[in-house]
Image (cartoon, rainbow, N blue to C red):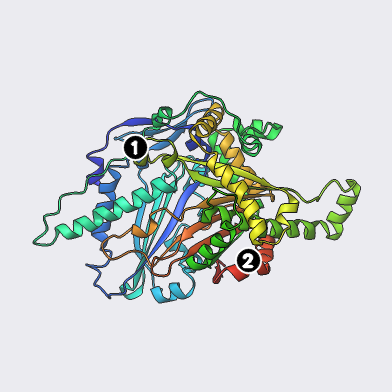
Amino acid sequence: MDLFKDTVDSQTIWLDGIDAGVYLYSVSVCYWFENSANESPENFMPAKVLKRAFYKTMQEFPILAGQLKATSSSSRMYVEIDKDKLNMPSYIDSHCSLDYAAMRKSGFNIHKLPVDRLNREYGPPVSSGLIRGKVEPAHFRIIRFKNNSGVVVFASIAHYITDGYGYSQFMNRWAEIAKWMQQQSKDDADEPFPVRKYNHDRSFHKSYRSSEIIDLEPATVKNLTTDTTFSRHFAWLSPGMRARVLRAVSYATPRSSSFFHVSSKKMEDLRTKVQAHAPEGTRYTVNDVISAYLAIVVGQAKEKAITDWWSRPIPKIIRKISGNRLGNPMDLIAAANINIRPRIDDPNAGEYVGNMVVGGSTVFSRDEIQQSPTKETLAAMALKIHKAILAVNKQYIGQVGHLVNRHPSVNAWSMLQYARKKNKLGISNQYRFPHYSVDFGSGIPSMVRQAPHPFANTVFIMPDNPQTGGYLFEFNLAPDVEANLIANNDWMKLVDGYSKYQ
């Protein structure tokens, strides 16, 4: 730890509205490493090396040792790094009696791990920390399996510190330094220390935000600026009170986590078939097509759940009393998270590890989501998604930035809406993030998975192991919606495998 403490300087990092909007959440991923070569503990993910490399990496990410604070009005948030009173992330390296093969057989189910070996509050250290009065910026858990058969590295970093891109940069840097340290222990090692540069200064956003005002699509504006009595009160609550509201919504919203695998071949075949019906000059991405597919199958699953609920005796009476105004089918709002770094024409954007993800929202009518996912219907829906994503240009990004900085908590309100409302679906595509390049010197992970999200109505698209190939879809849905999705023949014909967290 001294390796870090001796180098850190006191500083204050003011958060941008995009950071403040997601401060109640964490980015949490599990990396599973198998000791397939049967190496000794000194050579396979060596504990001393990983810990020393971790604190060496902290030198380049000092924000991880800061304390989250807010101004007296709660309208602006910042991270204070005090070198004499550091708020260090927790780092625990432990053993358990389970064998790695058993974890692989369970589908890498985190719930199979001993409770005392892992903090099972996957939703962040942030909301629970705010309630307790102190936020831990991150948790790092390394669990070693029986007979040195494998290791799982669980890392959870508060979302106000970074997004998925910045998270993967930290993990890759930690692994890179650990690997370098092991190479240096060899007699013939002469590899220089790998130099990298990371930018945590939120003023970077000013370099690309234009003052030009443009019209955003209504769905995005509504999510960011919805003005209701509840949203106004929520926006000006203290950070701790917002966390209590978030926790209450989390507990009141049942959710179930499930995983589906789709092969690269199936995905590309689907994209190619849909592409044949695209307008001339338009090239659909896999993301365009699969987002349209998800809108249909999840939208149908959600509508069936709503219809079934309102057909129960008591809800049926309530609906009748309301004059059938309640329980009617709704449009589906699908929001895709977009990494904007490649879109701002700044060669230094890749160095910035604060939050640079904005959502592009697409509204699908009930008629659209009730269709079968044929090539023709997918092409029409994929075109809407394609246009929405293309619209996220420099001016769009700047306008969203102005909106969320006008009231920094509005983004948190919109995320709360996704947790609460059944007609919304958040899609986070992390397929291109370099999760499988995380190599601590003992090879890449055999599996990388998101930890279960604390809210329903979200799906993460993750890469599978490069040797297997394909896509992992990690759903967090209400149990009845999940059951309807599994019963959907169109979806189950596309997927190759299925498992769930119990």
Q: In percent of the image, x 58 and y 43: which residue is there?
A: 387
Image position of 302 (left or right of 93): right
Coordinates of residue 319 in the picture (x, y in percent):
86, 50
Looking at this view, name the residue that lies furthest to the top. 211
Amino acid beneath label 1 = Pro
Image position of 157 (left or right of 475): left
Q: CA distance from mark 2 to mark 1?
A: 40 Å
Badge number at residue 347: 1
Q: In percent of the image, x 67 and y 56: which residue is there?
A: 377
Q: In percent of the image, x 66 and y 51: which residue is there?
A: 252
Say which element carries label 2. helix
Coordinates of residue 480 in the picture (x, y in percent):
69, 62
Image position of 423 (left or right of 429): right
Amino acid beneath label 2 = Trp
Q: Work out whether residue 86 or residue 160 is closer to the camera in this orientation and state it.
A: 160
Q: Which residue is mark 2?
A: 491
Looking at this view, name the residue that lies furthest to the left. 187
- Judge the density around disc 2: few (<14), some (14-19), many (≥20) Cα neighbours within 10 Å: some
Coordinates of residue 449 in the picture (x, y in percent):
46, 61
Q: Quadrant of the C terminus?
A: bottom right
